[in-house]
Amino acid sequence: MRQPIWVDAVRSGLAGARVDAILSATALHWLQPEELARLYRDLAGLLDAGGIFMNADHLRTGCSQIDELGRAIAFTERDTILARGEIDSLDAWWEGIEAELRPFPALAKFVAESERRSERSMPVVDASVEFHRQALIAADFREVAEVWRHTRDAVLLAVR
């Protein structure tokens, strides 16, 4: 989605048809503000009037104390779940994937690419809900609202 060429491939696959809904989940926080603005314009061009775009992601409220509290709660929840052994840490998960792929050297390049793109090497963009709302409005969405939130995660719904 960083490269505008993806939208041409989608349009080609749609053969002129438009779509009613587009959903993104925990993907757009990697994009820089100018990339998000372009992406939102591209999405608006794919949607029919009245179509919806929904984005579930890490989205700041824009209020520093509330954002810091939400971040603290989210990491406390994560650490509690990790301590109970209910899930693997991300590092342990990737170690398991690497172990599974070891017998298949041709797949090693995918593990290396994932590591290159990991959160440790690519910073998360820290854009607020208001930034996303304004960018969506500028991209020709007529209504945008936060429809769900838990700590640092939120869902935005935009109507074209």
Image (tube, rainbow, N blue to C red):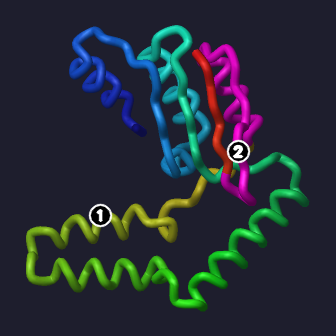
Q: What residue is at 51 percent from the left and 17 percent from the top?
A: 51
Q: Position of residue 87 (x, y in %)?
A: 49, 81
Classify residue 146 as left or right of residue 107: right
Q: Position of residue 19 (x, y in %)?
A: 39, 18
The amino acid on which the numbered mark 1 sits, given as a three-letter code, is Glu
Count neighbours of disc 2 (C-alpha within 10 A) and say few if under 14, some if 14 to 19, many if 20 or more: few
The amino acid on which the numbered mark 2 sits, given as a three-letter code, is Trp
Give yes or no for residue 145 being in the magenta stretch.
Answer: yes
Quarter of the image that includes the C terminus = top right
Q: Position of residue 34 (x, y in %)?
A: 57, 33
Quarter of the image that includes the N terminus = top left
Magenta residues?
Answer: 129-153
Please determine whether, in this image, residue 67 is positioned above or below residue 1.
below
Which residue matches tag 2?
148
Q: Which numbered disc covers residue 113? A: 1
Classify residue 19 as left or right of residue 70: left
The one of 13 and 84 positioned closer to us in this rendering:
84
Q: Secondary structure at mark 2?
A: strand
Q: What residue is at 70 percent from the left and 44 percent from the top?
A: 148
Q: What residue is at 72 percent from the left and 26 percent from the top?
A: 134
